[in-house]
Image (cartoon, rainbow, N blue to C red):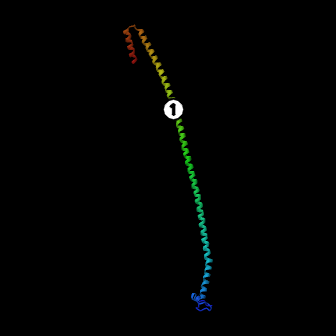
Amino acid sequence: MIFFAETQTAGVPEIITSLFPNLPNFIAHVIATIVLVVILSKLMYKPFRKTIKDRRNKINELLSEAVQKQTEANIGVRKAEALLQDAKTESSLIIQTSKVDADIQKTHIISEAHKYADIIKNQAEKDIAQERSKIEAEIKTTIVNVAFDAAEQILQTEINKTKNKKIVDEFIENLDK
């Protein structure tokens, strides 16, 4: 059987011969194409489809992981924001408590200082009163002694107005020395 010869085949209409000038050649090409398609589909198409399917699965897996990680990140952000808010609340509470404690301590310190100042003032007043009493007693004693000394000198001498005055003046001068 010769496939490439240009011969007229009996019983084949002319239109087919005009469309397909060499029918055996055409059939050989169709069979070769079918064989080639079958071989390529077995060797190339199925592995190609498998690769595409694997790639699609990998992409879907990566997308689902990304969605899951994004969800976890959002949860982490919400937790961090909640912790931050709790920390702010706690710090403001600590500051407020510290201010109240400081005010109480300030009031206590001022009160203690006033008490201590009053004690010192009262002690100073007592000391001043004692010193004053002591000095007044000394002055009285001195005045009495001076009066006795003056009286003694007056009595020792003759009672005379001019002499009396002279003795008192001398006595006063002796006091200044």
141 relative to 56, above or below: above
- Residue 48 shown left or right of residue 155 in the figure: right
Q: How busy is the neighbourhood of tag 1: few (under 14 within 10 Å), some, or many (20 plus)?
A: few
- Name the residue at 60% across, 69% down: 56
* Residue assigned mark 1: 114
Q: Is residue 93 above or below residue 159?
A: below
Nearest the eye: 37 or 143? 37
Residue drawn at x 61%, y 75% as measured from the top left: 45
Which quadrant is the N terminus positioned in? bottom right
x and y percentages locating residue 168 in the rendered image: 39, 13
Is label 1 in a helix, a strand or a loop?
helix
Q: How many marks?
A: 1
Residue 112 percent coordinates (x, y): 53, 33
On the image, the x and y values in percent for residue 160 come to 38, 8
Q: Determine the image quadrant of residue 24.
A: bottom right
Pick the quarter of the image with the C terminus: top left
Residue type beneath disc 1: His
Residue 65 lies in quadrant = bottom right
Q: State the residue at coordinates (59%, 59%).
A: 71
Q: Is residue 82 above or below residue 122?
A: below
Q: Is residue 174 left or right of residue 72?
A: left
The one nearer the camera, 94 or 142, is 94
The percent position of residue 44, horizontal first and vertical second, equals 60, 76
Residue in the picture at 52% in, 33% down = 111
Which of 19 and 66 lies nearest the eye of the viewer?
Answer: 19
Picture quadrant where residue 95 is located: top right
